[in-house]
Image: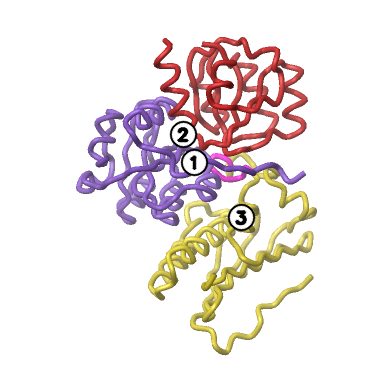
Amino acid sequence: MKLSEVKKILNADVIVGEEHLDLEVKTAFGADLMSDVLAFAKAGSLLLTGLTNSQVIRTANILDIAAIILVRGKKPSTETINLAKEFKIPLLTTKYILFETAGRLYAKGIVGCLEKVENNSVLD
Amino acid sequence: MNLETIVKEFGLEVRCAPENLKNNVTGGYTGDLLSDVIANSREGYIWITRQVHQNIVAVASLKEHAGIILINSCEPSRETLEKASQEKIPIMVSSLSAFELTGKIYNLLGKKD
Amino acid sequence: MKITVCSTENSLYQDSFDIEGGNFNKAGIVSTRIKSILKQMGLPADVVRKCAIVSYESEINVVSYAKKGVINLTVNPETVLIEVVDEGPGIPNIDLAMQQGYSTADQKIREMGFGAGMGLCNIKNYSDIFHISSEVGKGAHLLMTINIKQ
């Protein structure tokens, strides 16, 4: 699906990357913990998150994330926006909560960028 | 829809408070920032998170969530389990990612409502 | 336990990068540099990815807990070595620190999306060889090896 369709499904506003809405995305990862993203998210996926600080952009850049969707209508700082521009990572914002955002995208055929984690227990 | 339907549908592993699987699920909230969950989730929601710390029980109890589902096969800490058992908050574990599980539960809730 | 990076006469690249403790605005700059260096050297994408994640989590740790630190990057024909040395409080109980979910992070770190007790696990999981040591009151020392050829 094109990023422009993701935008439509989520009634999202494009903050950075209006020129990249033709980008194709198939998978997504949703999380508010960047270490969780670093552990599991795959290159080329959408990142759905409620965090808005600049580390979100840095994490996305480290992992070659295709685009970032900020949920719950959160507004990023100028610093975050500038960094997204610098790294050319599309940054969108939707008013929907993560549950609704993931649900809508999943219903339209976007799948998780990983299916299962079999063993992730606390080393105790 | 009650919690038990969701547990059966997606093969969730129940870690505590099985006596409360009849809890009615009115919606869902996916997220790992406790302050956001407190601010935006509602009574009767199923909370999907990868946080395993005992603070999740306090949040779920405060907001009267139907239960908590830990994703990516994350296991609750011992303190979390003890507290959740006391507070009678069901904690379940899924091997799916937050995105996948949320998508599936969203669709299920949509169909039955 | 003191580990030193073995001499690298045949190393392809070697550089050191300083990290400022406590400065979250700059956290991630060094790992972004490292990523682009390794990419430019033409290393396989999965190796670049592992090195970038390992460097980034390490950098976040230094910024979060130490006064200052340094990342030494060495690229050998068959391995990438990432060594992180910091000056700070050190780690009193390494076994505990390595447990997933264990964290001493404050609110500020958590607001950045870190401090959930996953960082060291990520570093370990993405490294082919992982060493960690610490002297309380002085700092921590991490040495990660990532194999270029599997």
Q: Chain of mark 1?
A: A
Q: Is residue C47 magenta?
A: no
Q: Which residue is mark 2?
A: B100
**Which quadrant is home to the C terminus of chain C?**
bottom right
- The residue closer to the viewer here, C70 or C147, is C147
The amino acid pointed to by label 2 is Glu
Do the CB atoms of the residues marked 2 and 1 lie less than 8 Å apart? yes
Q: Marks 2 and 1, how far apart in space?
A: 7 Å
Q: Is residue C112 magenta?
A: yes
Do the CB atoms of the residues marked 1 and 3 lie less than 8 Å apart? no
- Residue placed at 67% from the left, 22% from the top? B58
Q: Chain of mark 2?
A: B
Q: Residue C118: in sight, yes or no?
A: yes
Magenta stretch in the rendered image: C110-116
Viewed as shown, does residue A9 lie left or right of A73?
left
The amino acid pointed to by label 3 is Asn
Dot 2 falls on a residue whose secondary structure is: helix
Q: Which residue is mark 3?
A: C61
Closer to the observer: label 1 or label 3? 1
Disc number placed over residue A115 in the picture, else none: 1
Residue C143, given in percent of the width and then of the height, sits at 65, 68
In the picture shown, does residue B95 fall above or below C60? above
Indicate the chain coloured red by its letter: B
Q: Colour of chain C?
A: yellow
